[in-house]
Amino acid sequence: MKISHQEVLHIARLARLGLTEEDVERLTEQLSDILENFEILQQVDTSDIPPTAQSGALLNVVSEDETAPSLPPGKALANAPQKEDDFFRVRAVLE
């Protein structure tokens, strides 16, 4: 399936992308290639394959909490744009 120049411009407008004419030409070719690959994949017989929600097992990877000494205030505030005593200074958000 070939995608047209106008379709690429329409998609870019929907995504609020500013594209040069060179970008549009490149994307027209690339998106057409992607759609052609999907057309090939649609021809694969998947009637014997059960539908799945996940292709792999879900697994949460977490590490144990470990206590460690805090940074000294001077080191924690070393790159702060504004500081006041031992605190970060920020603009007021609420009145």
Image: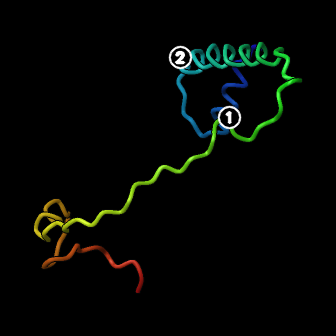
Q: Position of residue 56 (x, y in %)?
A: 64, 36
Residue 74, position as x, y percentages in the image? 10, 68
Name the residue at 61% across, 16% down. Answer: 30
What separation in Å lies between label 2 and label 1 (alpha carbons)?
A: 37 Å
Residue in front for this viewpoint, 11 or 30: 30
CB atoms at circles 2 and 1 under 8 Å apart? no
* Residue that appears at 59% across and 15% down: 25
For this view, does 58 lie left or right of residue 80? right
**Residue occupying image coordinates x 57% and y 15%:** 26
Q: Is residue 12 above or below residue 6?
A: below
Q: Is residue 87 left or right of residue 15?
A: left
Question: Mark number for residue 55?
Answer: 1
From the viewer's perspective, tell me whether residue 32 is left or right of residue 75: right
Q: Position of residue 72 (x, y in %)?
A: 13, 69
Mark 1: few, some, or many residues within 10 Å (few <14, many ≥20)? few
What is the quadrant of residue 18 in the picture?
Answer: top right
Query: Element at badge 1?
Result: loop
Q: Earlier in the sequence, mark 2 or mark 1?
A: 2
Marker disc for residue 69 = none
The location of residue 57, given as percent across then percent down, is: 63, 41
The residue nearer to you, when weighing 17 against 57, is: 57
Tag 2: Cα neighbours inside 10 Å, few (<14), some, or many (≥20)? few
The residue wearing badge 2 is 22
Q: From the image, which quarter does the N terminus lie in? A: top right
Q: Quadrant of the C terminus?
A: bottom left
Mark 2 lies on a secondary structure that is: helix
Q: What amino acid does circle 1 point to?
A: Ser
Amino acid type, label 2? Glu
